C-alpha cells in the first residue's frame, strides 16, 4: 500500500539454479534478474513517456525494492535500539552468570577437588559407621516414640475398653497424666506410664 511505501513492480525470471537447470549459477540468475529489470524500466518509459516515468521508476525493479526494504529495516532498528540494548545487556549478564557457573563446575571436577570430596565423604562415612556400631542413647521420639493411644493398643491398658473410651477417663488422662497426644520415648514414656498406673 501507499502507507507502507509501495506498491513495487518487479519481474523475476522463472527457473532453477544448478547444473542442468535453467541457470548454471547464482550469478547467471542475477544477470537475468538485472536484464528483466532493465526491460521493465524500458517498458514503463515507452508506455508513459520520460516525464511521467520519472515518478514511477523508483518503484520498478527488484533493486529498488531491496533498497527500500533495507532502509525500512535500518529505520526500524534505529527506532527500537533503545529497547533492544537493555534486553541485550540483560541477556549478556545471564550468559556471563551461566558461564561462571560452568567454570565453577569444571573447576570442581579437578583432581584435587575430587580427592578432597572423596576424603570428606570417607571421613563422614567412618564417623557414622562408628556411631552405629557403638550405639547412642539419643533416639528421635517422632520415629520411635508412642502416643498414649498407640501404647495402649500395643501393650494393653489397665482398664477395660469401654472405661478407657469414656469421657471421664479421657479427662483424667489429660489433666493427671498429660502428654496423651505427644509421642514419648524412653524415660519420658516410662514416667507417663507410671502416672497412668497411679
Image: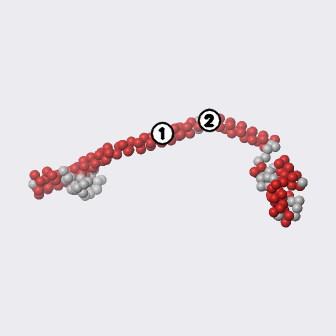
The relative height of residue 150 versus residue 115 in the rendered view (above or below) is: below
Element under disc 2 = helix
Left or right? Give the position of 77 relative to 192: left
Question: Depth check: 19 or 49 in front?
Answer: 49
Specify the label residue 96 is tagged with: 1
The relative height of residue 125 versus residue 17 in the rendered view (above or below) is: above
Residue 20 horizontal/vertical position (percent):
28, 55
State the CA–CA distance, disc 1 to disc 2.
24 Å
Q: Residue at the location (31% across, 47% down)?
A: 76
Is residue 74 among the parts visible in the rendering? yes
Q: Residue at the location (32% across, 45% down)?
A: 79
Count the numbered circles shown: 2
Element under disc 1 = helix
Specify the label residue 166 is tagged with: none
Is residue 10 among the parts visible in the rendering? no
Q: Earlier in the sequence, mark 1 or mark 2?
A: 1
Residue 168 horizontal/vertical position (percent):
83, 61
Picture quarter with the C terminus: bottom right
Question: Depth check: 15 or 136 in front?
Answer: 136
Question: Depth check: 60 or 74 in front?
Answer: 74
Residue 51 horizontal/vertical position (percent):
10, 52
Density class for disc 1 (Cα within 10 Å; few <14, some 14-19, many ≥20) is few
Density class for disc 2 (Cα within 10 Å; few <14, some 14-19, many ≥20) is few
Specify the label residue 113 is tagged with: 2
Question: Depth check: 36 or 132 in front?
Answer: 132
Q: Residue at the location (65% across, 37% down)?
A: 117
Q: Residue at the location (29% across, 46% down)?
A: 75
Amino acid at each position: 500500500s501507499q502507507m507502507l511505501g509501495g506498491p513495487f513492480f518487479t519481474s523475476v525470471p522463472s527457473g532453477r539454479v544448478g547444473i542442468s537447470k535453467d541457470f548454471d549459477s547464482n550469478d547467471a540468475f542475477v544477470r537475468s534478474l538485472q536484464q528483466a529489470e532493465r526491460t521493465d524500466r524500458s517498458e514503463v518509459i515507452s508506455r508513459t513517456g520520460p516525464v511521467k516515468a520519472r515518478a514511477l521508476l523508483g518503484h520498478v525493479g527488484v533493486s529498488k525494492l531491496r533498497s527500500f526494504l533495507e532502509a525500512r529495516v535500518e529505520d526500524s532498528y534505529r527506532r527500537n535500539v533503545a529497547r533492544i540494548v537493555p534486553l541485550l545487556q540483560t541477556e549478556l549478564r545471564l550468559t556471563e552468570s551461566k558461564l561462571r557457573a560452568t567454570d565453577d563446575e569444571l573447576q570442581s571436577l579437578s583432581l584435587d577437588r575430587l580427592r578432597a570430596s572423596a576424603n570428606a565423604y570417607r571421613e563422614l562415612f567412618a564417623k557414622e559407621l562408628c556411631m552405629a556400631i557403638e550405639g547412642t542413647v539419643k533416639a528421635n521420639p517422632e520415629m520411635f516414640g508412642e502416643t498414649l493411644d498407640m501404647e495402649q493398643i500395643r501393650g494393653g491398658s489397665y482398664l477395660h475398653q469401654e472405661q478407657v473410651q469414656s469421657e471421664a477417663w479421657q479427662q483424667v488422662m489429660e489433666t493427671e497424666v498429660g502428654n496423651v497426644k505427644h509421642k514419648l520415648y524412653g524415660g519420658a514414656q516410662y514416667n507417663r506410664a507410671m502416672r497412668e498406673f497411679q
